[in-house]
Amino acid sequence: MCGSPGGTASVVSEVVETGGSGTRAFGMIESALQEARLEREQIELLAIGLGPGSYTGIRIALAIAQGWQLSLPGDHLKLVGLSSVECLAAQAQAEKVRGRVNVVVDAQRNEFYLATYEISESGYQETEPLQIRMRAEVE
């Protein structure tokens, strides 16, 4: 739990699952809520990973988030989509990595997602958009 600028508390909880062919999404949600000691109705913002990643996993995440949002009155729950590659660039910037950085994510079958960023003290800027490349090109 950490304080936010407005003086209200925010809680961050994360449950990660990799591999496997099934999904345990609802169990993961329950685990995160229990860890944060929150009820579903108390959540005000959901961040959804938009990939790159498993097409099925991304679709499931979007469907659950939209269903969750529709189950609540008004605009109680806000949804934010996040690019995994952009998050990696932001992390590199926070860890004081500077200059031209290639962000590479395994896309399976000898293919990789590749994007290039220019990272500076003040932020990061995509200089080459996300593309799928073969292993030889990435190496």
Image (cartoon, rainbow, N blue to C red):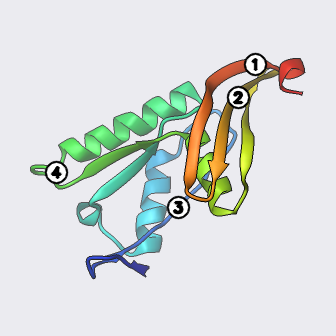
Is 117 left or right of 8, judged from the image as shown?
right
Is 113 left or right of 79, judged from the image as shown?
right
Q: Closer to us: mark 1 or mark 3?
A: 1
Question: Relative to residue 69, is residue 110 depicted above or below?
Answer: above
* Mark 3 surroundings within 10 Å by alpha-carbon count, few (fewer than 14), some (14 through 19), many (20 or more): few
Considering the numbered disc 1 on the image, is that residue within a helix, a strand or a loop? strand
**Where does the N terminus fall, quadrant-wise?**
bottom left
Disc with the residue nearer the chain's start (4 vs 3): 3
Marker disc for residue 42: none
Which one is nearer the viewer's eye here, 7 or 53?
7
Question: Relative to residue 41, is residue 74 depicted above or below?
Answer: above
Q: Which amino acid does label 4 sit on?
A: Leu
Query: Is the residue under label 1 in contact with that under label 2 (CB below 8 Å)?
Result: yes
Q: Mark 3 points at which residue?
A: 14
Marker disc for residue 114: 2
How far apart are the two marked residues, 2 and 1, measured between alpha carbons? 7 Å
Q: Mark 1 points at which residue?
A: 133
Considering the numbered disc 3 on the image, is that residue within a helix, a strand or a loop? loop
Q: Which amino acid does label 2 sit on?
A: Leu
Q: Residue at x 70, y 40 (%)?
A: 19
Disc with the residue nearer the chain's start (3 vs 2): 3
Residue 78 in the image: x percent, y percent? 26, 50
Considering the numbered disc 2 on the image, is that residue within a helix, a strand or a loop? strand
